Structures are given as structure tokens and as C-alpha cells.
Image (spheres, rainbow, N blue to C red):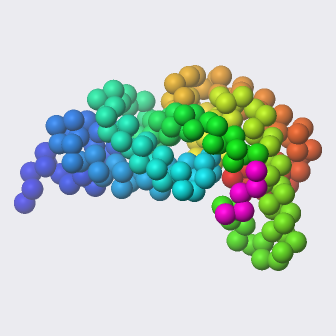
Amino acid sequence: MRPNHERDASDLDDVELIARSLDEPELFAALLTRHHTPVYRYLSRRLPVDAAEECAQETFTRAFVARSRFRPHHPSALPWLYGIATNVVRERRREERRVLQGPRADVVAWEDADDAVERVEARELRRRLGEALAELSPVDRDIVMLAAVAELGASEIAIALETDARTVSTRLWRSLGRLRLTLGGELLGNGRSLHG
């Protein structure tokens, strides 16, 4: 029987896992297993699909290197990982801008749009949303994407972006207002979400 101090990595929460990985680096692999899918999903909505996996790997590589600086503001490491992923995206800003301004037929996943007219409308709506997002400042765009794609609340976004929740709430409210004006309420007011 295993002693308690030798618990399996799956028994550890994120805070314990990162702390223990300082002495047992191989334990960090459990964090990758646990959080790769949501980090990849977030990145795949911000970058071309082929770049998203590369950026997800870069995110976890940077997290591993920076794990000694992790501060447990939240029981999950996911906001911290989203913050690192957002920084990776910022470094790819030119590529993101190109993606946001053009159609992304390869990642439009409207499974219920089985008829050609709906798919064309969905693609056009996605293109218009991309253009509207491209008009936001980089920080405001990051906040909107973390809220819409990663489905983080203001306090979690504040952790990810190293700011305060009140600032995040204000900027998110203002950005969503701008998007509603730009899109004429079409996307944000009819039940569809920002992350399609």
C-alpha cells in the first residue's frame, strides 16, 4: 500500500501538483493531461488550427519553466494557463489579425447547419464577427475571447491577465457593447454565442 505522501498524480489538485512538480518534474505531465483540451480549444479559436497545437505545446512548455512562479490564486491552474496561452497568442498577433479578417471555413463547426444556406450565413456571420473583434484593442479582444471561448468569469480573466476583476468587467461590458453596435445585435442578441 502506498503511503499518503506518495499519492498518485491524479489524486492531487492543481496547486499540489505544481508544487510537487518542483521536486518531481515528471508530475507536471498530469497537468498537461488534465488541461490540454481546454487550452487547445481556446487557442484553436484564436489561431489557425495548425498553429493552435504548436501554441498549446508552447504554453505548457512555458508553464513548466515558470512553475516555480505559479501563485495559487485559484484552485485550478487553468486561469494561469490561459494567461500564458494569451501571451503566446499575442506573440502571434499578425497571424491572428490575418485569421480574424478572413473566412475560416476550416474551423466553422456549426454541426446543426446541415443545409448550404445556413452554412453560408454562418460563415458570413463568423467573418463579420472576426472583423468586429479585430477592431477591438488587443487587451479587450483577449478579455472577450477568454470570456467567450474559455468561458472564464471576470475574476478568472483577471488572474489570467494579471489585472483586477473590476477592470475586466468594465472592459468586457464596453467591448460587448461595441460588438453589439458593430454587428447590429445580430450575433450577440439572438442566442448564438461568440464562440460559435
Q: How many marks?
A: 0
Name the residue located 54 percent from the left edge and 29 percent from the top edge: 161
Query: Would you say 190 lies left or right of 23 here?
Result: right
The image quadrant where one finds the N terminus is bottom left
In x, y percent, where is residue 81?
Answer: 45, 40
Give the residue drawn at x 79%, y 47%. 129
What span is in magenta?
A: 102-106
Please identify the quarter of the rendering in which residue 90 is found: top right
Q: Could one spot residue 147 in this view of the protein?
A: no
Whether residue 48 is visible to the viewer of this picture, yes or no, is yes
Q: Quadrant of the C terminus?
A: bottom right
Camera-nearest residue between 147 and 66: 66
Q: Residue at x 21, y 39 (%)?
A: 20
Identify the image quadrant of residue 69.
top left
On screen, 164 above or below 114?
above
- Magenta stretch containing residue 164, yes or no? no
In the rendered image, residue 43, in percent from the top left (x then y), is placed at 55, 48
- Which SS type dominates the magenta stretch? loop
* Residue situated furthest bottom in the rendering: 115
Residue 139 at what x, y percent from top left? 65, 28
Report the front residue among 44 and 83.
44
Which residue extends farthest right? 184
Residue at 56% x, 22% y: name it: 163
